[in-house]
Image: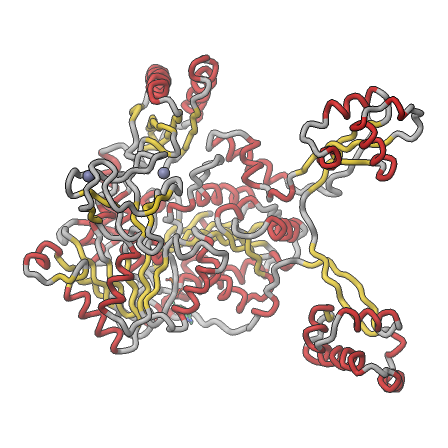
Amino acid sequence: AKSIDHILDESPLVNAIQLNHWQWIASYYMCTLGEVFRGALPAAFILESETQLHFRPEVQVDNSAMTDDEYLIYEALQHQSSLTMQLASSILNRKNVYPVVQSLLQKGVLALHEEVQQTYKPKWVKYVRLSPAYAEESQLVALLDSLKSSRQKEAVLGYFQCQAESRKPISVKQLKEKSGVSDAVLNALVAKSVFETYSLQEDRVDFTNAFQPYTLTLSMAQQEAYDALQHAFKTKPVVLLHGVTGSGKTELYIKMIEATIQTGKQVLYLLPEIALTTQLVQRLTRYFGNTVSVFHSKYSNNERVEVWHNVLQQNPTAQIVIGARSALFLPFSNLGLVLVDEEHEQTFKQQDPAPRYHARDAAIVLAQAHGAKTLLGSATPSIETYHNVKIGKYGLVNLLERYGKTPLPEVQLIDLKEAYFKKQMKGHFSVALLDAIAEALALGEQVILFQNRRGFAPVMECMTCGHIPQCTNCNVSLTYHKFKNQLRCHYCGYAIAKPSHCHACSSTDLITKGIGTEQIEMDLAQIFPQSNIKRMDQDTTRGKYSFEKLIDSFKNREIDILVGTQMLAKGLDFENVSLVGIINADNLLYYPDFRAFERSFQLLTQVAGRAGRSEKQGKVMIQTYNPLHNTIQQVTHHSYTEMFKEQLYDRQIYKYPPYYRLIRLTLKHRDFGKLKEGSLWLYQGLKQHIDSPVLGPEEPAINKIRNEYLRTILIKTPANKSVTGIKKTIQRLLDSFDTVAQYRTIKVTVNVDYY
Ligand code: ADP
Ligand code: ZN
Ligand code: ZN
């Protein structure tokens, strides 16, 4: 038996349900348990192990026989008794200190010791209180009289002001702000035993102040839907709430949450995007106060650890957890309800790194383990989910009326062929769209314009030789960003200054093609110089709060026109938007993916749903070359079921989900030839051993990213058959692939239920 060196955690940080669930994720999504752990645990839990050098005073040594380096370390150890390797190397001013350490070890001067530490740093806040000696008023009066320094008096008076304003403990920081006195003054008062200071460990995030309780009355349609939900959950553990945009799904969620926490159970509320949490957190904390907690990847590691502990200890502050997909990994022990809002969003699927899990699907499995209900919500449910409703696996509740009975927005199609032909275009805008914008602005209403591409123009082309500047690391053309006057790669971040001449033929006749959000923003500024126009895309929302700021100023009507990418589509609620314009619907439709039509429908419907959320019916204008395209027609007529039927039919014929499960293997290597050979080897193995369609090896549309070539292999397995066997076969082949010497360096990633 060995002696215990450290006790890392007094009670486990991870519970049994989590462990089981993580094991399920590892096996279903074909990754290692370690990969799941790495994705699941806040990095601050991960232990850093450090080698410490320990002094051994009991050993007698002759220090005159030491080299200078040995002596320096010996010296330092006598004073400090232990050193980290890093410190030792800074003492010697060189990197490799190991030879020196080795020789000291042999001489017995020091011992090596592994020290293990968590990197989480609790936040301590310093508080101040008046000494109990002054509890009586008379004592206090005497004190104030006795204080000769006016600064000190101000500090004491400031203390009482703070006390009058809140009943909470008073922090030193708060007191300094209130009284305007310095640390020196406060320290003097502490020395005189007038004040006492003490420290408390605190959470970094606090929602206490947001609590503004109000009563929520459901509309008649909402109440019916709520009753229907209760009914549906009696027989089905998973229920889809199909509610049109603006129907008040959030209000139903709030009622569901309320009913759940009243039974003492926890709620997990998953959102597809961090950006969305702000608006929702505001709404929920107003109603539930600080029983709401938030968890997502923009949180610092320390913040995440705190939420983790709160959930683990079932602190009331974490009864309701709102989060992006990783919130799924928190240590719930008593879940009663899992909500997946905007369940159709593809961002629920983790891409890289592993585990490549689908948060909606993993949440359903998690809920099952807790015996909890799962409520999926969307105005445009995914084909997979709606199919599960149709085959009776999930329950369904419809809410097809907007709150306040506002009609759904009127959709008007603008045929770009015709508009160009009739010369009714101004740049990329049809005259009809511009007129509608002008009209809305004149009425003091706000406008949202949607364009799926960021940057100024997708490509720059030489008119003399046709050369298009490419990224040097990826096989993709560079995007022109006018504001920074750069060409940038959207895959690896590579950027160069905008060239003045063609690198292929030196011609200066360069033009830009296509349009991005940046160009739309600039063009609009010329047409509507009086209006405040802002842009919302990845480039303008990088900072921690930049997205929130944009949303807030748009909500406060400081912005007239908001131009943006799909970020705009997701669940945002602005009541003053009367017009939504879609600059070009076609680049969505012709995206090379089997889900392109489904996604176009969802995205267009969701963007459109931002219009007319108050009393007035909103208007949506879609510019397209394909006004008769089925998907565009389905959007125009708000016809989800038509879209569903058509897509489902195609999926069946072409063997895609929900009829087939997809497992995609991606192979990567810097050597094109080796990759080609390796992927063929693997493909042939799969083909031989798997009795389902195996497609490829294929070059993806962008076949080189960050100097690595890519190939993919797609395996399709019938959804009504177990995939366990096939997964085992794939794993076996991947293992033997690894043993082939020349393919050892080829990286293979597995994506189960590939999106
Ligand atoms: P959805 O998420 O279904 O698109 P929301 O939940 O955002 O719809 O609701 C749309 C708007 O209607 C929001 O501004 C919301 O506050 C308001 N609303 C919905 N239901 C109610 C209700 N019962 N009482 C008051 N306001 C409501
Ligand atoms: Zn050229
Ligand atoms: Zn690149």
Q: Residue at x 28, y 70 (%)?
A: 578
Q: How many marks?
A: 0
Lateral position of residue 268 relative to residue 182, left or right: left
Query: From the image, which quarter does the N terminus lie in?
Result: top right
**Toward which corner of the image does residue 140 lie, by quadrant?**
bottom right
Q: Going by the image, does 468 lie left or right of 575?
A: left
Residue 152, given in percent of the width and then of the height, sits at: 80, 79
- The quadrant in which the C terminus is found is top left
Q: Residue 304 at what x, y percent from top left?
A: 60, 50
Query: Does residue 186 sit above or below 489 in this rendering?
Result: below
The scheme the figure's colours follow is secondary structure
Which quarter of the frame holds ligand 2?
Answer: top left
Residue 550 picture location, percent across and down: 41, 64
Q: Residue 170 is drawn in which quadrant? A: bottom right
Using the rendered view, name the quadrant where residue 610 is placed. Answer: bottom left
Left or right, 8 with respect to 110, comes to: left
Instruction: Work out whether 218 lies above or below 429.
Output: below
Position of 330 compared to 482: left or right?
right
For the point 38% across and 41% down, which residue is it?
494
Residue 334 visible at all = no
Q: Is residue 114 visible?
A: yes
Seen from the viewer's position, the closer of residues 407 and 276 is 276
| Nearest to the observer: residue 598 or residue 364 | 598
Q: In the image, residue 481 lies at what x, y percent?
A: 32, 51
> Which of 124/225 is in front?
124
Identify the residue shown where x is 44% and y is 20%.
734
